[in-house]
Image (spheres, rainbow, N blue to C red):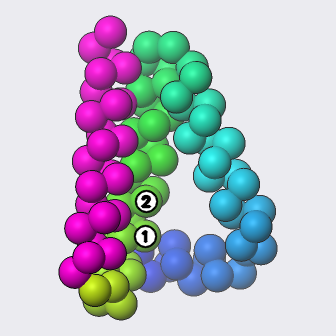
Amino acid sequence: MAQRVVDRLNRLNRTVAFVATMVLVVAALLLPGVIGGVLLLAVVAGLAILLQATWPRHDSRRRAARLAVLVLAVIIAVLKLTS
């Protein structure tokens, strides 16, 4: 499944993919409560799929940094869901 996602993303314009992801993240952070939390968890799920697909290509520092970003996003999403 992850490879299909990566193949599909490779066909997209990278700028469009980046801007769309940023719009989703900003919307998730600005929307209140459950809506923002669920949207942020959806973004995290997509990024986790990409991380899993590209895991062998990254060195340990990049892996740690990307995992830290995902964990931070999950923490923010959980805080939004519980508030």
Does the stretch in magenta take in 64?
yes
Question: Between residues 74 and 63, which one lies in front from this camera angle?
Answer: 63
Where are the magenta residues, as a range?
60-83
Choose top left, top right, bottom left or bottom right for residue 24.
Answer: top right
Answer left or right for 41 relative to 59. right
Question: Could you tell me if the residues under marks 2 and 1 are in contact, i.e. CB atoms within 8 Å?
Answer: yes
Looking at the image, which residue is at 24% across and 67% down?
Answer: 64
Q: Is residue 2 above or below residue 26?
A: below
Q: CA distance from mark 2 to mark 1?
A: 5 Å
Q: What SS does tag 1 mark? A: helix
Q: Quadrant of the C terminus?
A: top left
Q: Position of residue 46 (x, y in %)?
A: 45, 57
* Residue at image point 72% right, 54% down: 19
Q: Please name the amino acid that badge 1 sits on.
A: Leu
SS at badge 2: helix
Amino acid type indicated by mark 2:
Leu
Quarter in which the N terminus is drawn: bottom left
**Residue annotated with mark 2:** 47
Residue 1 visible here: no
Q: Position of residue 16 (x, y in %)?
A: 77, 62
Left or right? Give the position of 83 relative to 43: left
Point 36% across, 42% down: residue: 73
Q: Which residue is mark 1?
A: 50
Residue 16 belongs to magenta span:
no
